[in-house]
Amino acid sequence: MEMNKKNESSRDNSDKSETADNAQSKIEIDKKSQEEAKNKSISWTKIATLATVISVPIAMIAILISIMIENANKTERLEKELLSLREIISSSKVDKPNNGGDKDSYEFDAHNVIEDCTKAIEIDINNTNAYIRRGEAKTQLRDYKGAIEDFNRAIGIDSNKVEAYNGRAVVKEELGDYKGAIEDFDSAIKIDSNYADAYNGRGRVKHSLRDYKGATEDFDKTIEIDPYYVWAYYWRGEIKSELSDYTGAIEDYNKAIKIEPDFKLAHDAIKRISNRK
């Protein structure tokens, strides 16, 4: 009997212990479930918050992408138009007619160049070639103020644009600013020592200043760089004529005519010398 009571008591104690253990385990499981639920709640809250925060930049990025696509299409169109204008401008240099040609046609061409260059500048405000070509056209139309502004603009964008210095020098020469003209021709030559136009232009100015030796040296250099530079022969012939070297003058005029058979000024110069004899 006592043994049975002890065994039963032992079983009761064991059952109580097991019940306590089960209860503790259940408590721990409940705590773990609550913790997991809490963590899940926190995670979803974080995700929701993050989604809210990120949603604005995503919208902004979408707008930016849309703008970029639109600008890319616009840029492509502008580049095609600019390329077309560049081709026009590159072949639109306006030269003063050697032979006193059709003045109306000449001025019409100059106006066309100005119009094309203005369009190019509207597309690309830093298009130095467009400023230079427009400045040359304005020079031929005697819009010297406008020409100077265009050449200054080109130099402001690119201080090594030799044609801009040369163009500005020509305007200064036309305005009688010989000192300023020589300075600009010098600047052009400093940038490009083989720029024939600058030597020829400087020679013209020196001729106007009666620096015949310096002028002849510049015309000689022009011809050395470009043996077909017709104006250099003409102006060198003018110097020789003024120095009474008529034979030498006629030789230079004839060289100019050989290059350009219809060069009226050279033909007239030969007739002038012939009438002296």
Image: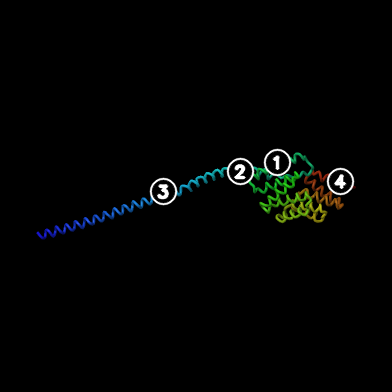
Vertical arrangement, residue 10 with respect to residue 79, above or below: below
Q: Check disc 3 and report the residue beneath it.
A: 48
Q: Nearer the viewer, residue 146 or 38?
A: 38
Amino acid type indicated by mark 3: Ala
* Cα–Cα span, label 4 and label 3: 98 Å
Q: Sequence-wise, which precedes: disc 4 or disc 2?
A: 2
Label 2 to label 1, Cα distance in Å? Answer: 20 Å
10 Å neighbourhood of mark 3: few (<14), some, or many (≥20)? few
Which residue shows up at 10% across the image and 60% down it?
Answer: 2
The numbered mark at residue 44 is: none
What's the amino acid at mark 4? Arg
Q: What element does badge 1 sit on? A: helix
Pointer 2: what residue? 78
Quarter of the image where one finds residue 96: top right
Circles 4 and 2: CB distance less than 8 Å? Answer: no
Mark 2 against mark 3, which lies toward the viewer?
3
Q: Nearer the viewer, residue 61 or 251?
A: 61
Tell me which numbered mark, 2 or 1, is placed earlier along the sequence: 2
* Spatial separation of the CA atoms under disc 1 and disc 3: 64 Å
Q: Answer yes or no: do the residues labelled 2 and 3 have beta carbons within 8 Å?
A: no
User: Quadrant of the rendered structure where residue 137 is?
Assistant: top right
Q: What residue is shown at x 68% (from left), y 47% (from top)?
A: 131
Which residue is labeled 4 in the image? 272
Name the residue carrying label 1. Answer: 112
Name the amino acid type tagged 1. Answer: Asn
> In terms of depth relative to the viewer, which is nearer, 182 or 204?
182
> Quarter of the image containing the N terminus?
bottom left
* Closer to viewer: mark 4 or mark 3: 3
Q: Secondary structure at mark 4?
A: helix
**Mark 2 residue crowding within 10 angstroms, few (<14) / some (14–19) / many (20+):** some
Counting residues from the N terminus, which is met first, the one under dot 1 or under dot 3?
Answer: 3
Q: Residues within 10 Å of mark 4 (few under 14, many from 20)?
A: few
